[in-house]
Amino acid sequence: MTAPASAATPAPLPAATSALAAPQSPLDPRTRLLLEGPIVGTLLRLAWPNVLVMVAQACAGLIETWFIGRLGTDALAGMALAFPAVMLMQMVSGGAIGGGIASAIARALGARRRTDADALVLHAVVIALGFGLLFTLAMALSGRWLYGHMGGSGASLDAALTYSHWVFAGAVLVWLFNSLAAVIRGTGNMALPATVTCVGVVALLPLSPLLIFGWGPLPGMGIAGGALALLLYYAGGCAVLAAHLWRGRSPLRPTWAGTVLRWALFKDILRVGLLAAVSAISTNLAIGVATGLVGSFGPAAIAGYGTAARLEYLLVPLVFGLGAPLVSMVGTCMGAGQRGRALRVAWVGAATAAVLTEAIGLAAAVWPRQWLGLFGSDPAMLEAGAQYLRVVGPTYGFFGLGLALYFASQGAGRLRWPVTGNLVRLAVAAGGGAWVLQAGGGLQAVFAVQGVALVLYGLCIAASIAGGAWFGPVGRPRSTAGLLQRVEAAGLAATK
């Protein structure tokens, strides 16, 4: 992984885009930076505003949770029930399909297919509208069944349904915001989405309590007020991002006039995005299944686990802060045929994410109640959440490792093994958790299985990429230099 940078002849475009013919255009300075800038410096330069935006976005959810926690344990349990579904929408729209959007645009710009890059913006908008409506319909029809099977009942189930109905009624806004942000990140611009999100979070600070508790003549809406505040935040963000793309200084120039929707461009986004969605779905299913297993111990246990697991959800946007520039850098390098640089970028990002998430996990394991106490004081809730963090927190580094490599694989357009890693995690978390519960194990045993699942997730993805998953059949893990020699020998790449 320390081989010197080498010049590489451009590789053929993936099958999904090989038929897209467009004249080459000069490289935008931002694209040139992705291809030629120093890896560590460029990655950190792109990552810091994106880490800021993701932390701010996570803080938006934490602010909402803190205020809803003041409504009582049932409201907190209801939010814990609905949260996996809400995060699934966030992860699929922002990380999965959003990653497919950013990857497609980065590869098009790297290959100097400027016309296709412009047209991809409009295809991304159509995809966002379609999936947003699909999520609204799906949750309207299945919400009660889903939350009931996760252990919800009585007041906690009512709270979950109220929050869910409000959030998913505005699912199109969430999808459109994340898709437009992905378009902009695909050009290498991480600062604008960061600015928009941070300003929105500042606006949520007074807006959430105002709508939840009311003030003066304005009546409080309870848990529904938190959901409405979140939707207003996304609506304002959509307006700003759209204005930048259609009227700002973006290197993209999207226009509806003369643009014909083409299946080849939809496929270029969806062949990466849909596979990535499988990963997002399996991640949320793993947490949803664990919530169901914990549900047999009562509402306080659900609230404790759900509150503790929010820290894992917080890691997702945090790693996404590194993952978004990984998508752009790896995708641009792969589009330009710079395979060695793409691999080195991936490993630098993965190592950074692993160290960061492991530090957070260890801190949570040592001081679990400092985190949990932010959201409630019920003793049973605190004990359940503390058990989870003590057992699972030390494995968070493997989660960060696998997640960063998942984003890098999005940029490379090669997601089979990251999806496999997520499915392994789901199988172990669900099957193993059910087995230990049937065998008479308690909460700690269920949580231990979740930790093992995270370790296997990270190792599976890392070993596959080190074994050549981006370039052909997986073999013995090798260094970047050794891997590229193997690829060259197999006739899959030409390097000097």
Image (spheres, helix red, strand yellow):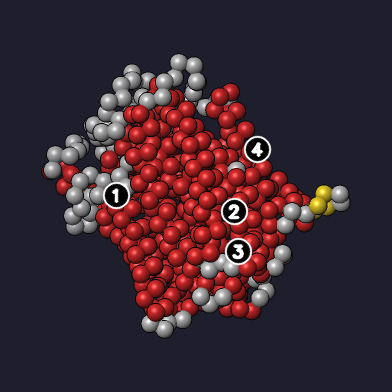
Give the residue pinned by disc 3.
157
Q: Earlier in the sequence, mark 3 or mark 4?
A: 3
Please name the amino acid that badge 4 sits on: Gly
Q: Secondary structure at mark 3?
A: helix
Residue at 56% from the left image edge and 75% from the top image edge: 298
> Do the CB atoms of the residues marked 2 and 4 lie less than 8 Å apart?
no
Instruction: Give left or right: position of 437 versus 84.
Output: left
**Is tag 1's residue or tag 3's residue first in the polypeptide sequence?**
3
Q: Residues within 10 Å of mark 2 (few under 14, many from 20)?
A: many
Q: CA distance from mark 1 to mark 2?
A: 32 Å
- Mark 2 or 4: in front is 2
In the image, taking residue 358 as reference, residue 466 lies left or right, namely left
> Foreground residue, 79 or 237?
79
Comes first in the chain, label 2 or label 4: 2
Label 4 sits on residue: 236
Labels 3 & 4 near each other (Cβ < 8 A): no
Q: Position of residue 419 (x, y in %)?
A: 33, 53
- Number of residues whose C-alpha sits closer than 10 Å to that of mark 4, classed few (under 14), some (14–19) or many (20 or more): some
Q: Which mark is residue 88?
A: none
Residue designated by label 1? 416
Give the residue displayed 48% in from the left and 68% down from the top.
292
> What's the residue type where badge 2 is placed?
Ser
Indicate which disc, 1 or 2, sits on the residue closer to the N terminus.
2
Residue 164: mark in rendering: 2
Residue 481, image x, y percentages: 23, 48
Inspect the image, locate mark 1, and give the three-letter code of the amino acid beneath it. Answer: Arg
